[in-house]
Image (cartoon, grey):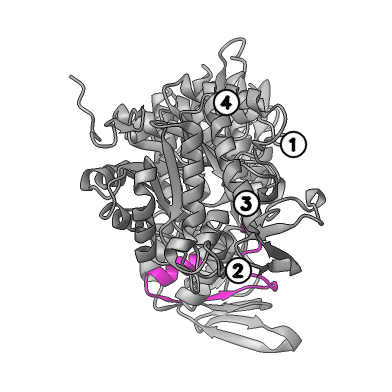
Amino acid sequence: MFTPKFPHLSSPLRIGNVTLQNRMCAAPTGFPYITADGLVTDDMIAFYELRARGGAAAVTVSEALTHSTGRSHGRVIDLTADGVLQGLTDLARAIRRHGAVASIELNHSGIYAEMDIPKGERDAAALRYGPSVASLPGGRRAAKMTQDMIAEIVKSFGDAAALCKRAGFDMVMIHGGHGWLIEQFLSPAINHRGDEYGGSPKKRARLAIEIIDSVRAAVGPGFPIEFRMSGVENMFRGYNIDDAVAFAALIEDKIDLLHVSAGFGEVNFDMTHPSMFAPHGVNVHLAAAVKKRVRVPVATVGALGEPDMMEEIIASGAADVVCMARALLADPELPRKVVSNRSGEILRCLRCLTCHTERTLTQTRICAVNPIIGRENESRFARPPAAPKRVLVAGGGPSGMTAALTAARRGHKVILCERSDALGGALRAGRDVPFKHASFDFIRNRELMMRLAGVDIMLGVEVTPGLVRSISPDALIVAVGSEHIIPDIPGADGANVFTASELPDVISKLGEAVAVLGGGLAGCESALNLALTGRHATLVEMGPEFAPDANPRHRPILLRILDEDYHIKMRANMRATAVSARGLHADAQRGVRVLFEVDAVIIAAGMKPRLAAADALRSLAPETAFVGDCVSVKNIREAVFRGYHAALDL
């Protein structure tokens, strides 16, 4: 008899007139592949359907626009657009046919209209409206909404909900958090009105209540209404958890599920979207505080994805539902794996914020560890190979592991050889580093999945031309990785000098004061790791900036932690000249010589491809592909992407 390992997570929950088959839901996650006029595309349908196929109890489509004045992003579903119903219907059907409840998030951005739209598409003349006049970054201003406009927007939410119900959605979610319009009215920091929509907490809640009532009138009794709110704003003069609890009490009889998130949009982005430096489930306490005071079921969200923690959240009564966004980008099948007692197969989200960065920079949605994201349709219709091949993969880093796993899943016979005694390549530098736990777990997961797929893994075996000839593969995938760039300075080979890759093995031997030579992402994270162990770290960088290679969502969080939380010394424009027993010698600007008196030096001056090792393996098999750092040193996203597609090309 089957006994679920996570019985509370796997249990059903009745919400209005629908039943959630488990307690794990796909939180609203924007997908930018929408037409310019706000219509649903086939790619978008495939994106959301993947979560439904993966076992999520409910899948919520993100941020559908209810009114022309509320467009926040470059690509959002416009529920007022001609022809939108057909795509909505196909989208709802795609979610529902896998047993998931289809929900859609209704939103208006208020003063943040046109906030995240590419410059070439921005309407410079567009007016922004909010509860009060507001000054915005870049010299923009927002006007105060009139009561007639408020009434129009309230009606738009009802009209939008009726349309979504007609399209076949099972629920609708009203977005009342994250700094958008409804929260702007709730916020004492933003709402300075003197009429019935401002002043007391109850008056500031009036817009939210009117919108909920408008939606209820449109969808009728029994149809589930979800409401999403921030438990705290965490900004000057913003509301706190006590205010949030009081507001929840005002609306609990009008809704069927209350989602408690955190933060006020761009003001504290990393509170709403916790980074790798924050604990898992960092915002659960907010949902728990609300749950104690209301009767309506409560959902929690924010850095969730660990089954043991999520089981405890439900079992303890801290929340009734757990919602995940980024965790289901990394592994859309996470809920199905939990319910079927396969939690060991879950691929963890790195919380590297690559997904958010790409939406901002390129208007695409991707994931660093899951190459299918953004290409769901392409992956679904990938053709199987004409005939299975014998494939040899040289290198067990992220690119090699991804290539081996993908090739094996397609039916090829795969041998992976790694010259060291462990898999992981450059990712092994993250072992024993708290904020890199998910990166190191990536290695464990890929090894498990390769073995389940039948990959023959050979450790301590370097792929040489002789080995290739003896195996005689049909295809050779070369993923031999990279090596550290060692500065050509006296003492760089000294007994007190180590590379960033060696840091986990030698950290206990370094002494109290350590200099990190190289202020890129690897150097910054090495310095933080040193600080976490109680050591005094100094970052020394030749250029003017630190972590310029980090993505623009991750970088400011990292630099703030280095500076404000750990007060790490950061010295830019310093050219290292030597290492001695006394420490690291450097030249500053205008010829000033500096000695950093430290016990040890960690070199994080960059990596270079292992070109000689790669070149030695050319022209030895009928098909040869070169992937990962041995081609160009970049990041895990590029390594995974290239390894995946090299295997698809076989």
Residue flagged by tag 4: what amino acid is it?
A: Leu
How far separated are the C-alphas under marks 1 and 2?
43 Å
Q: Is 583 a magenta residue?
A: no
The quadrant of the picture occupied by the N terminus is top left
x then y, percent, for residue 273: 49, 54
Question: Where is 115 relative to 306, above or below?
Answer: below
Q: Residues within 10 Å of mark 2 (few under 14, many from 20)?
A: many
> Helix, strand, or loop for circle 2?
loop
The residue that disc 3 covers is 357
The residue that disc 2 covers is 519
In magenta, the rendered stretch is 526-552
Question: Where is 405 relative to 260, above or below?
Answer: above
Q: Earlier in the sequence, mark 1 or mark 4?
A: 1
> Helix, strand, or loop for circle 4?
helix
How far separated are the C-alphas under marks 1 and 4?
17 Å
The residue that disc 1 covers is 37
Q: Please identify the quarter of the rendering in which residue 546 is found.
A: bottom right
